[in-house]
Image (cartoon, rainbow, N blue to C red):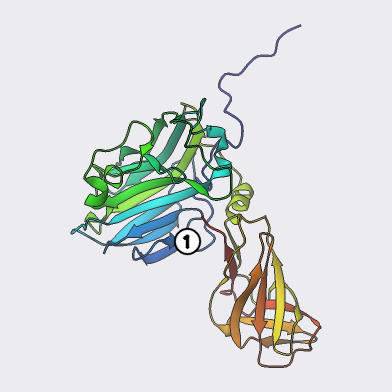
């Protein structure tokens, strides 16, 4: 009997990357948003939150088709549009992905036998800068930061983070709340830069030690920053970026944010029933179970972008759609018209043009 040949170069199993939308391929909200920086939030590429505190700098955030060959066709781009040369102590700018604790249990953090973590990513910029990538344990207020340099060409950086066994008191919670943040720190004031950079391993968090030695993205309006191919995996080896089909990535993203549209004119959001002569209530099923119950509805445009189809007619709404309630599986919406509905009859909730959309968020 001949033993089958073992291929030592075979990549590890599918699912090793704990970062979602690492190749920046999904952007449900928008592909480009300008004048960001006055507040924190999700604007373009799914799962990547811009965190901005106290800075006068402003930027455009975009998904662009400029990824490294063979890795991804897309990347996340930040373009400085308003500089901030006078950096106050409490300023900070970073790109963040929060990760649920139940997706981190393979690390075994905080207990005997904890695993090493390797973080890797592709980055370039308009010039040479020094920025930081931070792993921030929000369950136990522990963190570690690694500095990296940019050039005008794509470069892959990788860092091994030592296993954090601590004293047995700092495991990640096994739940759907945020336990770890991957932060790319791009600008910071003295509250975050005046100490000694914590670079060796996870340690109790001190703000002054988080961003020592970094450059400022806001130093000039000519500054651009590009990021893609972010991978976080167990072990001491930066394996090749895990390539994922778009449907898998989209499904993962829809756990946190689901957007129905924009859709074509007269397309249907969902079926409904007339709760009164003026209000139709519809229930939109989500394509995947969301992380938590959404608590609000996002929509675009005015009342004139929406309509109710009932009996043999379609009536334009007199108010924008409003949130009724939601579970992890579906969202209920109220559409309102001036009059004309027959209570108890079936209806359809529709768009009136291709800018209309409805969306629900369960983001960390």
Q: Is residue 133 visible?
A: yes
From the viewer's perspective, is 12 left or right of 274? left
Q: Judge from the rendering whether residue 146 lies leftward or rightward of residue 9; answer left or right.
A: left
Which residue is identified by label 1? 31
Residue that lies at the very extreme toward the bottom in this rendered image: 339
**Callout count:** 1
Q: Where is residue 150 in the image (x, y as percent from the top left)?
A: 30, 41
Image quadrant where residue 269 sits: bottom right
Q: Where is the N terminus found, in terms of image quarters? A: top right
**Percent of width and height locating residue 2:** 73, 8
**What residue sits 46% from the left and 26% below the top?**
236
Is 154 or 238 nearer to us in this picture?
Answer: 238
Residue at image x 36%, y 55%? 78
Is 144 above or below relative to 236?
below
At x 56%, y 37%, the residue is 105
Q: Which of 363 and 23 is in front in this view?
A: 363
Horizontal and vertical percent position of residue 261: 60, 67
Residue 133 image offset from top left, x and y in percent: 36, 42
Q: Residue furthest left?
A: 86
User: Is residue 73 visible in this depiction of the protein?
Assistant: no
Location of residue 293 by image quarter:
bottom right
Name the secondary structure under disc 1: loop
Of 159 and 352, nearer the camera is: 159
- As drawn, 278 above or below 58: below
């Amino acid at each position: 009997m001949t033993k089958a040949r073992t291929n030592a170069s075979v990549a590890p199993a599918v699912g090793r990357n704990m970062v979602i939308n690492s190749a920046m391929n999904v952007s449900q909200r928008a592909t480009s948003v300008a004048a960001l920086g006055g507040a924190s939030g999700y604007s373009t590429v799914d799962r990547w939150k811009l965190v901005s505190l106290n800075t006068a700098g402003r930027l455009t955030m975009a998904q662009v088709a400029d990824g490294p060959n063979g890795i991804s066709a897309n990347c996340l781009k930040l373009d400085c549009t308003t500089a901030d040369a006078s950096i106050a102590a409490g300023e900070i700018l970073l790109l963040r992905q929060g990760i649920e604790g139940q997706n981190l249990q393979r690390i075994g953090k905080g207990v005997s036998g904890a695993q090493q973590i390797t973080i890797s990513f592709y980055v370039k910029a308009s010039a040479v800068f020094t920025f930081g990538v931070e792993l921030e344990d929000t369950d136990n207020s522990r963190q570690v930061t690694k500095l990296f340099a940019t050039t005008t060409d794509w470069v892959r950086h990788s860092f091994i983070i030592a296993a954090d066994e601590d004293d047995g008191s700092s495991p990640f919670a096994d739940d759907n709340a945020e336990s770890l943040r991957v932060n790319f720190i791009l600008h910071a004031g003295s509250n975050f830069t005046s100490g000694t950079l914590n670079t060796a391993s996870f340690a109790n968090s001190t703000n002054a030690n988080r961003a020592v030695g970094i450059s400022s993205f806001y130093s000039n309006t000519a500054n651009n920053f590009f990021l893609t191919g972010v991978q976080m995996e167990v072990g001491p080896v930066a394996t090749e970026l895990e390539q994922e089909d778009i449907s898998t990535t989209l499904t993962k993203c829809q756990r946190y944010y689901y957007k129905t549209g924009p859709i074509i004119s007269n397309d249907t959001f969902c079926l409904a029933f007339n709760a009164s002569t003026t209000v139709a209530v519809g229930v939109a099923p989500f394509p995947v179970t969301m992380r938590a119950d959404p608590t609000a509805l996002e929509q675009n445009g005015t009342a004139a972008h929406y309509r109710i189809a009932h009996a043999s007619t379609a009536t334009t709404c007199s108010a924008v759609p409003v949130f009724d309630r939601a579970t992890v599986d579906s969202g209920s919406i109220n559409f309102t018209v001036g009059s004309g509905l027959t209570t108890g009859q079936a209806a359809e909730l529709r768009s009136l043009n291709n800018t209309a959309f409805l969306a629900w968020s369960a983001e960390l």
